[in-house]
Amino acid sequence: MILKPQNGFTLLETMVSLAILMGVSAIVMSGMVQMMKTQNAVGNRTEMHASVRSATELLQQEIGQAGKISLGPPNVSVTMAPVLPGSQNIIFTPSTGVAVYPGEYLTVDLGNSQEVVAVTGTSASPSATFVKAHPSALTPVTALGAFATGVVPPDAASVTAGCANSTLPTGGTYPGFTNGSTCTKLKLYGDVNGDGNLVYIEYTCSQGTQANPGFLYRNQMLITAASKPANDNTMILLGNVLANPNDANNNPVPCFNYQVRQIGNLPNYCVTNVALTLTVQTQNKDQQTQQFQPETKALLNVGPRNVIEVWGTANLVDSTRAQSIPASVTALLP
């Protein structure tokens, strides 16, 4: 009888095959783990960049809109009742939703009847001294120009700290604005949202450390608000904020830096440029380095276009276009 050879592997062949399979599996698993760590690092940085980009885009938009002045909602024509020369109360149409304040300049009527008057009285019961009679029951009224201090100029401490640069035509040193913006607080106001509502907005850059990072807060209220609410978690615009790295000369870099200019020869000042510098870290540690990944975002030329326009207009054409800061905003600055 002839025996047929049996099909199969010897024990030695099986052990060699298993060893090769385990080696290949280890290489594949190592590659997959490395790929997952890389994907985690990329995801961390992507999330961080998206958060910073969102915050800086909002800052750019609102700084650009700062100083915009509105009498009422968009596309609403504001008119007033007839008045005679002299001190007269102003009755607006529409009767609600029109926002004026003492010291504001209004341009009244058209053509040869046009004049500029300063609001007196109160916001609730405004008046003005008219030179001309305006007999029409629908005399058009506009508030031309913009708030010169739409980006509130920096205070004296910011000048000392080096985050306020000035270009003054009459020379001298910028003295600082009482309770103004600072190296870590950006204060601005106006019809920032383009909805006819005058609002005051305050950005607070609270820097921290890697172990205890800080936040960028955004606090918004109507300029007629009775008080300013304290910053809380509902106002956090950006988390994981760190102190900025020092510059090439080893000087601290502030969150906000201001370019100040003078309006005419009067002691009035406006901010025509804001520089932003924010340093943040990733939410989670990098799985490869076991360290948080920091990133610094700098925007060196953010211009408040309404303020820039009124700065040029007030210097060259009409100083009344530079509308003064409302008393209600001054009360919110401290």
Image (cartoon, rainbow, N blue to C red):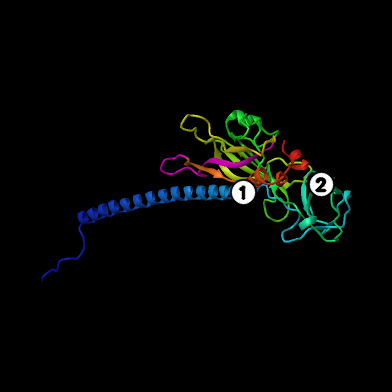
Look at the image and tell me in which quarter the N terminus lies.
Answer: bottom left
**At 47% from the left edge and 51% from the top edge, which residue is drawn?**
43
Disc 1 target residue: 305
Q: Residue at x 45, y 39 (%)?
A: 291
Residue on which the image places disc 2: 119
Residue 21 horizontal/vertical position (percent): 28, 55
Along the line of sight, which residue is nearer the eye, 306 or 23? Answer: 306
Residue at 34% x, 51% y: name it: 31
Residue 175, x across and y down, in percent: 66, 30
User: Measured from the top left, where is residue 257 in percent x and y?
Assistant: 58, 37
Q: Is mark 2 on a helix, strand or loop?
A: loop
Dot 1 crowding, Cα within 10 Å, few <14, some 14–19, many 20+: some
Q: Check disc 1 and give the amino acid type.
A: Arg
Q: Which of 123 and 333 is in front in this view?
A: 123
Please indicate whether residue 99 sits to the left or right of residue 313 in the image: right
Residue 21 seen in the current view: yes
Q: Is residue 259 above or below residue 3?
A: above
Q: Label 1: state its secondary structure.
A: helix
Of callouts 2 and 1, the N-terminal one: 2
Identify which residue, 108 or 181, lies in the foreground.
Answer: 108
The C terminus, quarter of image: top right
Q: Quadrant of residue 157?
A: top right
Q: Label 2 vs label 1: CA separation?
A: 25 Å
Report the magenta residues as a range. 268-291
Residue 316 position by quadrant: top right
Check if residue 155 falls in the magenta segment.
no
* Above-or-below relation of 136 to 215: below
User: Amino acid under label 2?
Assistant: Val
201 displayed left or right of 119: left
Q: Does the magenta stretch include residue 272?
A: yes
The answer to whether the residue labelled 2 contacts the one labelled 1, judged by CB atoms less than 8 Å apart, is no
| Residue 97 in view in this figure | no
